[in-house]
Image: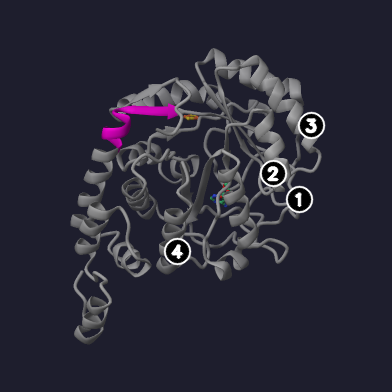
Amino acid sequence: MTNADPVQGDIWKEKGYIMDGMGAAQKLIQNHVLKKEEYVTLLECASDRDVKKVLTDEAVRLRKIYYGDKVYTRGLIEFTNYCKNNCYYCGIRAGNRNVVRYRLTEEEILDCCREGYRLGFHTFVLQGGEDPYYTDEIMVELIRAIKAEFPDCALTLSIGEKSRESYRLFREAGADRYLLRHETANAEHYGSLHPAAMSLSDRKQCLYDLKELGYQAGAGFMVGSPGQTVEHMAEDLVFLQELQPQMVGIGPFIPHHDTIFAEEKAGSVEMTLFLLSVIRIMLPKVLLPATTALGTMDPQGREKGLKAGANVVMPNLSPVKNRKQYELYDNKICTGEEAAQCRGCLAGRVQRAGYCLVTDRGDAV
Ligand code: 5AD
Ligand code: FES
């Protein structure tokens, strides 16, 4: 892309900004970092074939240097779909009366881990809504029980915003990692996706607390969420640069029929793939999943994600009877009876994509 306005172009140049898409791509490859305006330029060229190719090639090259052909696997256990929050985009938000709610008992959760361990998993991700039923005491007990039975496994939590003290207790009990997407790094945009009771500054504080407490932390955002602009996505990238998370989860926004965003357009697979490559280049060692949302938008989405720089997959280990009930968005894959063995399905997919599913804990390098 060339800059149509020479005067504006000169001003940008004086400020040291590169205003050409290919120039921005090359600068990112050189420096692993861009200024916000340069990310905007880059993202505006997300459908330029040459720019896309340069970035994809570099993302794949970097991923190969640090991880070879390995793809790490995490067993996802969706253990409660109760949630006290009301995020406007989410199918299991508190206000949705049409959800049949469920909670797994400690024994049921342990059974999921046992099944997962048998299948070769060495990381379990406990994900749930923000469910007050699981008090700190209950969580600590659960974390201890899992770590006692599976001492060679990593335990990841994904249970939303908690106090620093709660995070500290969970960490002390043995939790290793924590996933908490920031969703959008623009405060105004955050406000349009969440009720007034939630704030971007709280979310960011949680992420900084988690990092400080020694968790391997994961942030991330939805691609194409309602009202999102390229400027917003550029701010997401700047925030990731600042936070330096060990993991980044991104996937396309997908409307859910029981939300105010039911009629909104879904995010694009192409833009998600482009961002996966950009993030791999920004943070070469990052653990980057090819997400279920990506696989929902495109039957080959996760494979395409791996080929764009992703190096993690997260098969579902939740009891099949509950899977449909953890419906964050419409048409979520892996929720039917046929998906009882996501592990086997994904192993085949990873292999056919030219990669190798590995079973070790896969800590950040
Ligand atoms: N579409 C895509 N992703 C969603 N999430 C929640 N709702 C949706 C949706 N409608 C994502 C959020 C959350 C993660 C668990 O799932 O980014 O952090
Ligand atoms: Fe779940 Fe393919 S990964 S069915």
Front: mark 1 or 3: 3
The kind of residue on which mark 4 rests is Glu
Front: mark 1 or 4: 4
* Residue 322 in sight from this viewpoint: no
Q: Residues within 10 Å of mark 2 (few under 14, many from 20)?
A: many
Q: Is residue 24 magenta?
A: no
The earlier-in-sequence mark between 1 and 2 is 1
The earlier-in-sequence mark between 4 and 3 is 3
Front: mark 2 or 4: 4
User: Residue 60: x and y, percent?
Assistant: 26, 40
Q: Quadrant of residue 115?
A: top right
Q: Quadrant of residue 310?
A: top left
Q: Residues within 10 Å of mark 3 (few under 14, many from 20)?
A: few
For mark 4, what is the residue?
A: 235
Q: Which residues are magenta?
A: 63-72
User: Residue 305: x and y, percent?
Assistant: 36, 41
Observer-nearest of 77 and 321: 77
Which element type, helix, strand or loop, lies under badge 1?
Answer: loop
Disc 1 to disc 3, C-alpha distance: 17 Å
User: Residue 158: x and y, percent?
Assistant: 62, 40
Q: Is residue 203 left or right of residue 245?
A: right
Q: Is residue 117 left or right of residue 170?
A: left
For mark 2, what is the residue?
A: 129
Q: Is residue 69 magenta?
A: yes
For mark 3, what is the residue?
A: 138
For mark 1, what is the residue?
A: 84
The kind of residue on which mark 3 rests is Ile
Disc 3 to disc 2, C-alpha distance: 15 Å
Indicate whether 157 appears above or below 17: above
The kind of residue on which mark 2 rests is Gly
Observer-nearest of 155 and 121: 155
The earlier-in-sequence mark between 1 and 4 is 1
